[in-house]
Image (cartoon, helix red, strand yellow):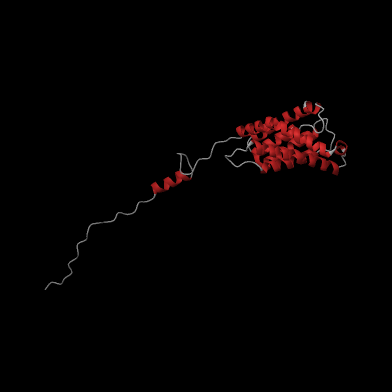
Amino acid sequence: MRPSRILLPAALLLLALVIQVSVLGRLQLPGATPDLLMLVVVGLALVYGPSGGALVGFAGGLLADLAPPSDHAIGRYALVLCLVGYAAGLLRPEAGRQRSALSALLVVASAAVVSTLLYATVGALVGDTAARHVGLTGLVLSALLYDVLLAPFVVPAVMLLARRFDHGPAPAEVGTGDGGGLGSLARYRTTREASPLPVNTKKKRPLNLAKRP
């Protein structure tokens, strides 16, 4: 694994967690809190794919579970972001293609709704009834609104950084270049193969086998 795939996500997740806890969490907005950590996970998953997205989501969720003033069970948000990162990674565009802004917003909107519902569902399973007092519908709608409004400023920047730091040397094309590979091997074989034996084009004189009288 490249070091950039460890250092860059770690730095982005830590930065997002600090901003979310120290700034966004103190805005006292109605309903849910803007989930900057989830937006970073989605942006990285759209570049790294499902496996990388799941690992990044689990790490980011575990940081949020351990960071104060967390008051829920450890591993709850790690599970949610792990699943969200994996699902977002499945929607990664193919190599050489760029995802449109509208499709990226749709991914963020789906992630906002799914993560809120999953978080409330896991909380209900472990006995956390905070979502019932606030209202699940209000939480989902507010999370959807805040995350979609914040996504254009976060997700493209995260994807750009991930692509730039993850960029590696392009593989050599077959049959081109002066380096090794199948192309040079094919040229070596064609120049080093034994040439066919020359064909003697001179006409042989017929032997005179007639008996002498």
Left or right: residue 175 compared with residue 32: left
Q: Image quadrant of residue 28? A: top right
Q: Residue furthest bottom?
A: 213
Q: Residue furthest left?
A: 213
- Closer to us: 117 or 5: 117
Q: Residue at x 65, y 32 (%)?
A: 156
**Can the viewer see residue 151 in this picture?**
yes
Q: Image quadrant of residue 144? A: top right
**Can the viewer see residue 75 in this picture?**
no
Q: Position of residue 199 (x, y in %)?
A: 29, 56
- Closer to us: 35 or 61: 35
Q: Image quadrant of residue 61? A: top right
- Closer to us: 130 or 9: 130
- Closer to us: 160 or 168: 160
Q: Position of residue 204 (x, y in %)?
A: 22, 61
Q: Quadrant of the N terminus?
A: top right
Left or right: residue 175 compared with residue 105: left
Q: Position of residue 7 (x, y in %)?
A: 67, 32
Q: Quadrant of the C terminus?
A: bottom left
| 16 in relation to 211, above or below | above
Q: Residue at x 65, y 30 (%)?
A: 157
How many callouts does the rendering have?
A: 0
| 42 in relation to 198, above or below | above
Q: Residue at x 87, y 37 (%)?
A: 130
Q: Residue at x 88, y 37 (%)?
A: 133
Q: Position of residue 140 (x, y in %)?
A: 79, 38
